[in-house]
Structure formats: structure tokens, C-alpha cells
Image (cartoon, helix red, strand yellow):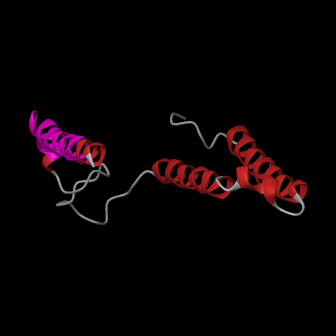
Amino acid sequence: MNLMTTILIITTALSLILATISFWIPQMNPDAEKLSPYECGFDPLGSARLPFSLRFFLVAILFLLFDLEIALLLPLPWGDQLHSPSMAFFWAATILVLLTLGLVYEWTQGGLEWAE
């Protein structure tokens, strides 16, 4: 019982300390960017018809693609418990090869460069 009480006190104290710090740190240097409801780099009060950078969206799509890759590869360590673990590793390697080829193609076409 003493161990459970100690663990409960430590976790409660740690949670309260972390919650207090997380509310205190962002308020140290408030500026217009931090106080803005949008953090995408666009002016939320401006016109919606302004041109935008396609490179920003290309990088965002690449980020989402590789984020999805990580989500697809997360169950890979449990693939060796299947009836045919070589098949799971084959499909994981296929995903990695396809994404690597796509990244190399995008790189060689100059799609990842910010400046012209």
C-alpha cells in the first residue's frame, strides 16, 4: 500500500509540475505571431485570394507521406511472429524502396529546392 501511495503522489506531483510549466513557458514572450490563432504563415485577416507558395505545400505533402510511412512500418517488429515473416518484411522493403525512389525522383527534378 505504501508503494502505491508513493507512486500516486509522484505521478500527481509530476503531472502538476509539467502542466504548470507548460502554461507558464509560452507566456514568457508573447508576440503577434504567438498570439495569432493561425501558425501557418498566412495572415488570417488578409484576403483569401492572395497567391501562396506551392513549395510550402510540397514540403507539407512530403512530410505527410513520410509520416504515413512511419505509421505503416510501426507494426514491422511484430512481423516476425506471423506465419510467413519474410512476406511482411518483403512488403515493408517494397514500401521503403518505392518511397525512396519517389524521393530521389523529386530531388533530381529540383522539387525540393527553395530557391530557383
Up/down of 66 relative to 104, above or below: below
Pick the quarter of the image with the C terminus: top right
Residue 67 on the magenta segment? no
Left or right, 39 with reference to 13: right
28 and 63: which one is in front? Answer: 28
In the displayed structure image, the side of residue 84 where residue 17 appears, left or right? left
Q: Residue at x 15, y 36 (%)?
A: 25
Helix, strand or loop for the magenta stretch, by majority: helix
Q: Write down the quadrant of residue 75 in the picture.
A: bottom right
Say whether residue 4 is left or right of residue 55: left
Residue at image coords 72%, 49%: 77
User: Which portion, as a residue range, is magenta?
Assistant: 8-34
At 82% from the left and 49% from the top, the residue drawn is 93
**Residue 76 x/y as whole percent:** 72, 53
Taking 72 as reference, is 5 above or below it? above
Kindly give the residue lying farthest to the front in the view shown: 1
State the image coordinates of residue 10 (x, y, percent, origin top left).
23, 40
Q: Nearer the viewer, residue 29 or 23?
A: 23
Residue 115's x, y, as percent?
A: 51, 33
Q: Is residue 20 magenta?
A: yes
Q: Between residues 82 and 64, which one lies in front from this camera angle?
A: 82
Nearest the camera: 56 or 15? 15
How many numbered circles are shown?
0
**Residue 50, quarter of the rendered image:** bottom left
